[in-house]
Image (cartoon, rainbow, N blue to C red):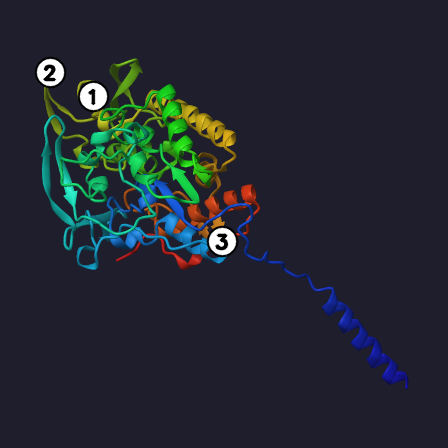
Amino acid sequence: MKHFKHYLYIIAGLVWLSACKPSIDTPKPSKGSADFTRYIAVGNSLTAGFADGGLYRAGQMVSYPSIMAKQMQSVGGGVFNQPLFDAGQANGSGYLQLTGFNADGTPITTPVTTNLAIRGIQAIPGFGNVTLYAKYTGDIENYGVPGIKLLHVSYAPYGNLNGFYERLLPGAEGTNTTTYLDFVTAKQFTFFSNWLGNNDALGYATSGGAGDVLTDKATFAGLYNLVIGRLTATGAKGVVGTIPDVTSIPYFNTITVGAVLGAVKKANPQVQALYINALVSGTTYAPRPATAKDLIVLTFPTNKIGLPISTPYGNLPYGLTPYTPIDNQFVLDANEVALAQDYVQSYNAAIKSIAASKGLAVFDAYTFLNNVKEHGLLESGISLNSNYISGGIFSLDGVHLTPRGYAIVANEFIKAINAKYGSSIPLTDVSEYSGVKFP
């Protein structure tokens, strides 16, 4: 009997322990107060799935809106059509491929030039040549257009100036008059995401402040208000993204002043500085030694450093004297960095204010990507960061995302939607998506 009682105590203890096991409650998928019957995505290259310096079918298929739409299907989301390139022209505009590494560890990238969807070049008077791509004529829910700015959304001729937008319009090249804002709102929708505005700062930054201008702050706010007003005019709910800090991406943090100078000094210890042509104020530039606060762009041809340049003082080494500074387009100098960040912060203040006035969800991409740069990220057991190639988030162009990066962004948008509308859209498994593809 004594042993029998002992066994009863053991069994009772096991039952108690099993009853006390922690449980993980997974919320049942719910749409909350939102309606995802027809979800549309408004935005630029990030929305389109642009990656590795180009728009191509494989990248389109893992755009963050397409990942979001897939997750929305469990809460009533409908079909999500994207303007995919056909399989026979799957390489779209062309893109970069990682084909190997140099002896010093630097990557070798090679342009993909086969199976493109380029149908020709159109000369637009007063503008220049526009590359035309294979037309898409089906239904669309992903309205991402690479290169578009807020400045372009209400500009009627824009369908003739951007080949990625032109391919979505029915008109022949040079004859389009449909504004982007009219195009995306022509058909009824119930929910939207909007990540317009990145290019209003990015173009200035990636050109080293030399090839584009920052959109005026008041103009940006007015146009953003116009866009949101149109998107919410029929009662649709939505989510918006803020503008990332343009200096948080690998495009500006891979080739550093210290690394280039160190390589030069190794060959020639007498060299003391790199020289850049830096912004002083307004439109005034002057040469000065570069510092760690000056950001060299990813596309800078480092083999130019030290090459003889003809000057009034004779042939002098490129980048190593005040008379032969590194060209403006290769460096976003410290004053240009501060200017770009000031404008982006103003843009984001407008985005948050306008979104709040309409009761919209907000994905704060500025804060999120800065945190990733500072601290890295652990997703699905995978350690990620903002480093070029090895970080897993950014593609070979150093600006746009890998499939894994787009999955991460999709989850952040979904988190913002769930928090705002009481929905429980399930997150995607980031581990199912790849980083940079190695040879």
Nearer the observer, 258 or 43: 43
Instruction: Label 3: state its secondary structure.
Output: loop
Q: Which mark is residue 313?
A: 2
For residue 147, the mark is none
Q: Which residue is mark 3?
A: 427
Q: Quadrant of the C terminus?
A: bottom left
Is residue 189 or residue 304 the one in the foreground? 189
N-terminal label among 1 and 3: 1
| Residue beneath the point at 49% across and 36% down | 360
In whole angstroms, how far apart are the C-alphas of marks 1 and 3? Answer: 53 Å
Q: Is residue 232 left or right of residue 333?
A: right
Image location of residue 82, percent across then percent down:
30, 51
Residue type beneath disc 1: Thr
Give the CA separation, mark 2 to mark 3: 63 Å
Local packing at callout 3 (Cα closer than 10 Å; few below 14, some 14-19, many 20+) is some
Q: Earlier in the sequence, mark 2 or mark 3?
A: 2
Of 91 and 264, nearer the camera is: 91
Q: Specify the amino acid type for callout 2.
A: Tyr
Name the residue located 18 percent from the left edge and 34 percent from the top edge.
161
Identify the disc placed on residue 321: 1
Give the image quarter of residue 292.
top left
Amino acid at pointer 3 = Leu
Determine the secondary structure under disc 2: loop
Residue 392 in sight in this render: no
Q: Position of residue 15 (x, y in %)?
A: 76, 72
